[in-house]
Image (cartoon, helix red, strand yellow):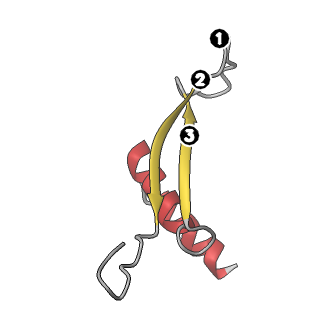
Amino acid sequence: LRFVGAATRRIARGIDLDEIVLGLCRATVPTFADAILVYLRDPLPVGDERPVDPVVLRLRRTDRIPEEADTDGVR
């Protein structure tokens, strides 16, 4: 529950969509996953708007844990 509360606060701090998505990525990686892809419907719905066209998803952001270098310095 502490993690969910902290993640909610991090995501809620976002002023615009990019900050909200970034907060979601940072709350998820590395606690729950090594990587995350965030796809959003394009265009985003407003209010109770229902889609009339086929749903199109656009990749908004990716994030992952950086790979660690081997002891030889080779990745």
- At a point 52% along the width and 58% down the height, the residue shown is 24
Residue under numbered circle 2: 56
Q: Quadrant of residue 55?
A: top right
Q: Secondary structure at mark 1?
A: loop
Identity of the residue furthest to the top in this view: 52
Structural distance between the alpha carbons of marks 2 and 1: 9 Å
Distance from the alpha carbon under mark 3 to that under mark 2: 9 Å
Q: Badge 1 local density, few (<14 within 10 Å), some, or many (20+)?
A: few
Nearest to N terminus: mark 3 or mark 2: 3
User: Mark 3 — residue?
Assistant: 39
Taking 38 as reference, is 41 above or below it?
A: above
**Point 64% across, 81% down: residue:** 2
* Quarter holding residue 16: top left
Q: Say whether residue 50 is left or right of residue 20.
A: right
> The disc labelled 2 sits on which kind of residue?
Val
Residue 54, relative to residue 19: is it above or below?
above
